[in-house]
Image (spheres, helix red, strand yellow):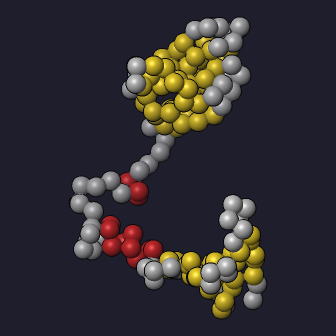
Amino acid sequence: MGRIGIIGDASGRRYSIKEVTSGEVRVEDETSGVVLARMSSTTIVDAGGIALNAHASRHAYGGADALPDNSLRLRQVKVEFAGDTTVSVAAGSTYTVPEGIWYVKLGANTRVELYIAGAWNTLIPAGGIGLIMSDGANVRLYNAGTASESSTLKEVR
């Protein structure tokens, strides 16, 4: 039976992940002796004895606190990516991101800004990569550099 020990940087507490039987693993706070979770290939049980997979199923499939029939379920979410769109933004200029959900890879001096509370605020710093949602008016790319540069957008449909 194997064991991995971890000491928390912030707390100094000792944690372990142990194989307690063939196919069952336990996560334990060794400092306090509390078992945080037990796991097998089919079940995860938290410290309170709640089987997490059963808990989620109860929500989805008619339990006491089931989700309404018109709720969005993960299996309904299908993601499709459009092709890359390259956008050139002149030095000191902006480009308003069209309505939609986009992955963005920014040029070295270009950042994503969000208009909120009466001001433009940095959402993704210059040169970064991230996921943005735009209403077509309140999200923009801003090139703070001294030359035109390109950024790439990929729409999520």
Q: Quadrant of residue 137?
A: top left
Q: Is residue 126 visible?
A: yes
Q: Quadrant of residue 87?
A: top right
Residue drawn at x 44%, y 22% as measured from the top left? 115
15 is higher (above) or lower (below) than 144 = below
The image position of residue 106, as x and y in percent, is 64, 25
The image position of residue 61, as x and y in percent, is 30, 70
Q: Which quarter shows the N terminus? A: bottom right
The image position of residue 71, as x and y in percent, is 28, 55
Residue drawn at x 65%, y 14% as measured from the top left? 144
- Horizontal placement of 48 versus 27: left or right? left
101 is higher (above) or lower (below) than 52 = above
- Horizontal placement of 9 versus 58: left or right? right
Q: Is residue 82 visible?
A: no
Residue drawn at x 68%, y 27% as measured from the top left? 127
Q: Which residue, as the protein is rendered here, is positioned at the far bottom? A: 21
Residue drawn at x 44%, y 37% as measured from the top left? 157
The image position of residue 129, as x and y in percent, is 63, 34
144 is higher (above) or lower (below) than 153 = above
- Horizontal placement of 59 versus 130: left or right? left
